[in-house]
Structures are given as C-alpha cells and as structure tokens.
Image (spheres, helix red, strand yellow):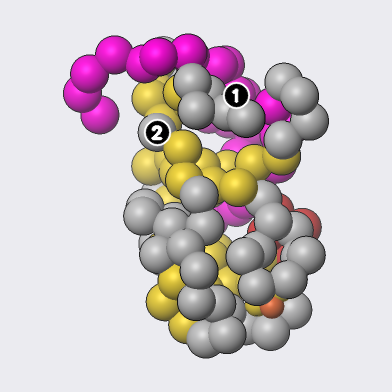
Amino acid sequence: MSGTMGEPFDLCATADVAAGEIGRRELPGGHVVAIYNVDGEFYVSDDVCTHGEASLSEDGMLDGYQVECSWHFGRFDVRSGEPCAMPCEKAIRTWPVRIEGDRVWIDVAGLE
Ligand code: FES
C-alpha cells in the first residue's frame, strides 16, 4: 500500500492471525473488525455481515480471498468488501492495511 495513513492504529501482530484464519479486534469506541490472513497478506473488514448479525470472525470461514458467512453462506471478497455470493448484496466495509515489521496497522481515520 502506498500513501500515508490518516490515523494509524496498531491492530495486532502478524503472528496473531495464522494463514487461512480470521482474527477479531475491537477498535477504540467499540467497533469490531475481522482480520484475514490470506497466505501472509492481511486484510481487514467490519466484523458484522451486511446480511444479518453474524460475526465473520466467529462464524466466517476464509476461502482464498473470500470470506463465507456460515449463517446463510453469503460471501465477500476481503480485498474489496464486495459481495460475491447471495444472499449478501451490500458490500462490507474494508480498512486500509499496512504491515510494519511484525505489526498489522489500519487507518482508522474514517471511524465513526
Ligand atoms: S448473516 Fe451473513 S449471510 Fe446471512
């Protein structure tokens, strides 16, 4: 990723989320995000599925670049947040990620 981050937040260590796994972290203010490790590349999205109230970090399964929600098997591309399987129709919010050393940072400038 290029460019500077508006408001960097130290999310976790890269070792906290194994390849193929989904981590969970609460941001300042209580907003929860899911952290995906796709073969050593990290992506972050909101934790709650846009179809229902499922937690993707708890009820999701990572399949390549897609996370599948176990409630109704909807899917999102973790790179863009775009839905890629019904019944998910609304994109999920994704967060810009930067890796520095062994830490995963996201930009929380847009956090409401
Ligand atoms: S709650 Fe996620 S697919 Fe329905």
Callout 2 amino acid: Pro
Q: Is residue 63 left or right of residue 53?
A: left
Q: Which residue is mark 1?
A: 11
Q: Secondary structure at mark 1?
A: strand
Residue found 62% across the figure and 30% down from its top: 112
| Local secondary structure at mark 2 | loop
Question: Picture coordinates of residue 33 (x, y %)?
Answer: 64, 41
- State the extent of the magenta-drawn residues as a range: 1-27
Q: Nearer the viewer, residue 29 or 59?
A: 29
Magenta run includes residue 21 = yes
Query: CA–CA distance between discs 1 and 2?
Result: 12 Å
Q: Please identify, in this view, whether the residue under mark 1 or under mark 2 is nearer the observer.
A: 2
Q: Residues within 10 Å of mark 2 (few under 14, many from 20)?
A: some
Q: Is residue 41 left or right of residue 31?
A: left
Name which quarter of the figure residue 27 lies in: top right
Q: Nearer the viewer, residue 26 or 41?
A: 26
Q: Position of residue 77 (x, y in %)?
A: 41, 63
User: Which of the four quarters of the rendered structure image does ligand 1 lie in?
Assistant: bottom right
Given residues 36 and 18, the one toward you in this image is: 36
Magenta span has 20?
yes
Residue drawn at (50%, 76%) of the image = 89
